[in-house]
Image: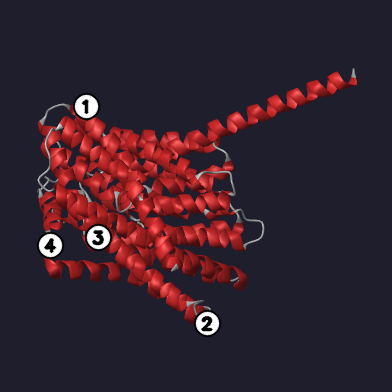
């Protein structure tokens, strides 16, 4: 009975979170395009399925991934073996990413559109190995209490330097590869690992030391994929073959009972490496059974079915209408509408992002009153909206990805020096959780659509990269907010101190 009540609350919450997307789509369809979509009933049903999927997924997280991740971290911390902790971090990072559906799709699309220069399997292994190694590095940082900002500053300086030398064809793909590593399964698991570890070690702060693993998992693939691109690309630019659009269209129209079973099987496949990793470390390394295994199994099943319902709902509800609207807006030959749509859809999809909701809740609990989960989500959504708007502007005017990315991360590095320590790790993590199951498909489709329909644009060079902008600017907005709030707090404290001193002097006279 308790599960049913929790599910009903989560379902109502999910419908509220999807409301901004519905509003944006309806406003543009009825007021700007002045057309009622033919598939409006399908869209409504799809959104309902999305809401059910999000509710099932969030309840599954609470029953399985969050408690298991924290429990394993706790047990490893008590065991006191640094090599085992590092091995666990690597295994979780690698297993969570190697079968990531968004990464598989992006890698396959990149192989097709680059005429085979980029190998899909090689790209996936490079990204998965990068994430595994960097999660192990993040675990090492948490154990020994090293400040995250130095890892991020040095890392992004390397990102900027590598970007300067990387060929244009690989830059957008490299940044998008970093973004798609963090989905609604991996983000909560990695976040739970960091928070659980920080909570188990004396002298560690869950907010300062627990967050940051997601940020590292986003950053390092950007470096490794660009290095891979430098190796495989010569000076000649490959022509866009158009296969990306064909693949995307094929994926959107897949249907039928067999396809549904295949997709559900893929969801099991995506979560299976994580389950095997947890079982191996729990039973083989720790040699202890799971606490309440039935509850954990139920939680994983809810995660899988929730994720499945979520993806099915997106394909029924938002993909068809999103694609047709992008094409219609371009045909209207008024770029202001495209900017407005990009900004608003970026905000709306981010507000509905399950991974952001989950991490916002974790941050609120870890901060013990310092942060508000809803305020964090709004700040991140504004950052994504600004980022996608700037990314769309780059595609429209044909600007260089080098300049935009280098400029964006230069701002991030400067703000890192100015921001309060408690917000840095969380801000970087929030830049990663924006690029998940809701945002990635819609944003990628928008970028590809623009690059396809605007003259003199190359899909490989210009179509990828919007996800990168969606990752950069939430870090900026959250850090600026923290800097402003810290300044106001310090000013208020100073004013109170001066008032108190003045009253004390008055009393002595």
Please name which of the two marks, 2 or 4, marks the residue nearer to the observer: 4
The quadrant of the image that shows the N terminus is bottom left
Q: Earlier in the sequence, mark 3 or mark 2?
A: 3
Point out residue 62 in the picture as x, y percentages from the top left corner: 45, 63
Q: Residue at x 60, y 54 (%)?
A: 145
Q: Residue at x 41, y 56 (%)?
A: 9
Number of numbered labels in the structure image: 4
Rendered image: mark on residue 104: 3
Q: Which residue is under mark 1?
A: 336
Q: Which residue is under mark 2?
A: 287
Point out residue 391 in the picture as x, y percentages from the top left corner: 28, 36
Q: CA distance from mark 3 to mark 2?
A: 34 Å
Please name which of the two marks, 1 or 2, marks the residue nearer to the observer: 1
Q: Which SS class for mark 1?
A: helix
Q: Which SS class for mark 4?
A: loop
Q: Decide: marks 3, 2 in contact (CB < 8 A)?
A: no
Q: Earlier in the sequence, mark 1 or mark 4?
A: 4
Q: Is residue 263 above or below residue 427?
A: below
Q: Which residue is under mark 4?
A: 255
Q: Decide: marks 2, 4 in contact (CB < 8 A)?
A: no
User: Is residue 24 or residue 157 the one in the foreground?
Assistant: 24
Instruction: Write down the quadrant of residue 254 in the picture.
Output: bottom left
Q: Is residue 360 left or right of residue 352?
A: right
Q: CA distance from mark 2 to mark 4?
A: 44 Å
Q: Is residue 211 left or right of residue 351?
A: right
Q: Is residue 195 left or right of residue 47?
A: right
Q: Earlier in the sequence, mark 1 or mark 3?
A: 3
Residue 451 seen in this snapshot: no
């Amino acid at each position: 009975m308790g599960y049913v009540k929790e599910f009903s609350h989560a379902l109502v919450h999910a419908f509220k979170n999807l409301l901004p997307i519905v509003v944006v789509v309806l406003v543009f369809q009825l007021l700007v395009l002045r057309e009622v979509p033919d598939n409006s009933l399908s869209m409504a049903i799809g959104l309902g399925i999305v809401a059910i999927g999000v509710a099932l997924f969030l309840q599954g997280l609470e029953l399985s991934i969050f408690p298991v991740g924290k429990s394993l971290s706790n047990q490893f911390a008590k065991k006191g073996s640094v090599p085992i902790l590092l091995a666990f971090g690597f295994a979780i990072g690698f297993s969570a990413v190697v079968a990531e559906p968004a990464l598989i799709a992006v890698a396959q699309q990149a192989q097709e559109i680059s005429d085979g220069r980029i190998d899909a399997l090689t790209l996936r292994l490079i990204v998965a190995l990068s994430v595994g190694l960097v999660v192990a590095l993040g675990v090492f940082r948490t154990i020994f209490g090293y400040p995250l900002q130095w890892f991020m500053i040095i890392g992004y300086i390397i990102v900027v330097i590598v970007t300067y030398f990387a060929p244009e064809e690989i830059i957008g793909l490299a940044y998008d590869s970093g973004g798609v590593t963090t989905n609604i399964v991996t983000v909560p698991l990695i976040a739970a690992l960091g928070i659980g570890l920080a909570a188990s070690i004396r002298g560690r702060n869950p907010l300062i030391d627990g967050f940051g693993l997601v940020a590292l998992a986003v950053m390092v693939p950007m470096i490794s994929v660009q290095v891979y691109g430098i190796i495989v690309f010569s000076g000649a630019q490959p022509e866009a073959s158009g296969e990306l659009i064909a693949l995307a269209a094929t994926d959107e129209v897949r249907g039928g009972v067999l396809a549904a079973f295949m997709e559900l099987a893929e969801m099991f496949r995506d979560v299976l490496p994580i389950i095997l990793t947890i079982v191996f470390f729990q039973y083989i390394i720790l040699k202890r059974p799971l606490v309440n295994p039935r509850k954990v199994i139920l939680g994983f099943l809810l995660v899988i079915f929730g994720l499945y319902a979520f993806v099915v709902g997106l394909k029924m509800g938002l993909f068809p209408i999103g694609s047709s609207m992008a094409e219609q807006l371009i045909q209207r030959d008024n770029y202001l509408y495209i900017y407005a749509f990009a900004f608003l859809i970026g905000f709306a999809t981010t507000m509905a992002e399950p991974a952001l909701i989950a991490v916002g809740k974790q941050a609120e609990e870890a901060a013990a009153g310092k942060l508000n989960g809803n305020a964090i989500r709004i700040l991140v959504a504004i950052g994504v909206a600004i980022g996608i708007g700037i990314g769309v502007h780059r595609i429209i005017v044909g600007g260089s990805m080098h300049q935009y990315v280098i400029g964006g991360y230069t701002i991030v590095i400067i703000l890192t020096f100015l921001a309060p320590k408690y917000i840095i790790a969380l801000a970087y993590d929030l830049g990663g959780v924006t690029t998940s199951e809701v945002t990635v498909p819609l944003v990628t489709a928008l970028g590809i659509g623009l690059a396809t329909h605007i003259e003199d644009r190359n899909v490989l060079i210009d179509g990828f990269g919007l996800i990168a902008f969606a990752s950069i600017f939430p870090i900026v907005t959250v850090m600026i907010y923290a800097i402003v709030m810290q300044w106001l707090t310090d000013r208020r404290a100073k004013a109170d101190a001066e008032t108190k001193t003045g009253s004390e002097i008055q009393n002595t006279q």
